[in-house]
Image (cartoon, rainbow, N blue to C red):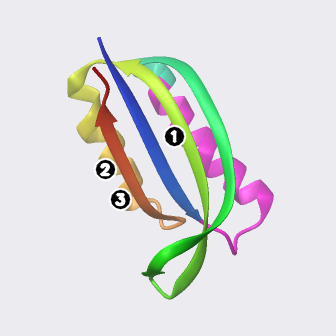
Amino acid sequence: MNKYETVMIINNEITKEQRNNVIARVKKYILENGTITEERDLGEKTLAYEVNKHKKGYYYLIKFNANPTSISELERIYRITDEILKFIVVREN
């Protein structure tokens, strides 16, 4: 298992309940394929540039351990989730 860190930027115009559902869906997939070591709610921030006509986004960070094969499926989940504006998954050393 490798160590990873992911940050997702969620649409800030959705309700808190919808946002929690998006985060729960991502966390559920990560827990099915690894373990979460740390998570941080970074809150709402102004984006450096507009993304899909949004000037602000809600940032959420998760550090986790997982097999490398599960990362492509996690990125697919990010891409098909309309509420997620941007994301990144990086491997830690």
Q: Is residue 58 left or right of residue 49?
A: right
Q: CA distance from mark 3 to mark 2?
A: 5 Å
Q: CA distance from mark 1 to mark 2?
A: 11 Å
Q: Quadrant of residue 4?
A: top left
Query: Which residue of the protein is positioned furthest toward the top in this rendering?
Result: 1
Mark 3 lies on residue: 79
Q: Which residue is at the front of the view, 46 or 17?
A: 46
Determine crowd level at label 1: few under 14, some 14-19, many 20+ residues with C-alpha closer than 10 A.
some
Image coordinates of residue 78 in percent, x first then y, are: 40, 53
Q: Which residue is at the front of the view, 2 or 81?
A: 2
Image point (67%, 69%), residue name: 12
Is 50 placed above or below 89 here?
below
> Are circles 3 and 2 on residues that touch, CB within 8 Å?
yes
Image point (53%, 20%), residue name: 36
The kind of secondary structure element at disc 2 is helix
Q: Earlier in the sequence, mark 1 or mark 2?
A: 1
Is 39 placed above or below 84 here?
above
Name the amino acid type tagged 1.
Answer: Val
Residue 31: in magenta span: no
Q: Earlier in the sequence, mark 1 or mark 3?
A: 1
Which quadrant of the rendered structure holds the N terminus? Answer: top left
Which quadrant of the rendered structure holds the C terminus? Answer: top left
Q: Is residue 24 left or right of residue 90?
A: right
Q: Is residue 93 left or right of residue 59?
A: left
Q: What secondary structure is the magenta-colored segment mainly?
A: helix
Mark 2 lies on residue: 76
Residue 20: in magenta span: yes
Q: Which region of the structure is painted magenta?
A: 11-30
Mark 1 lies on residue: 26
> Are circles 1 and 3 on residues that touch, CB within 8 Å?
no
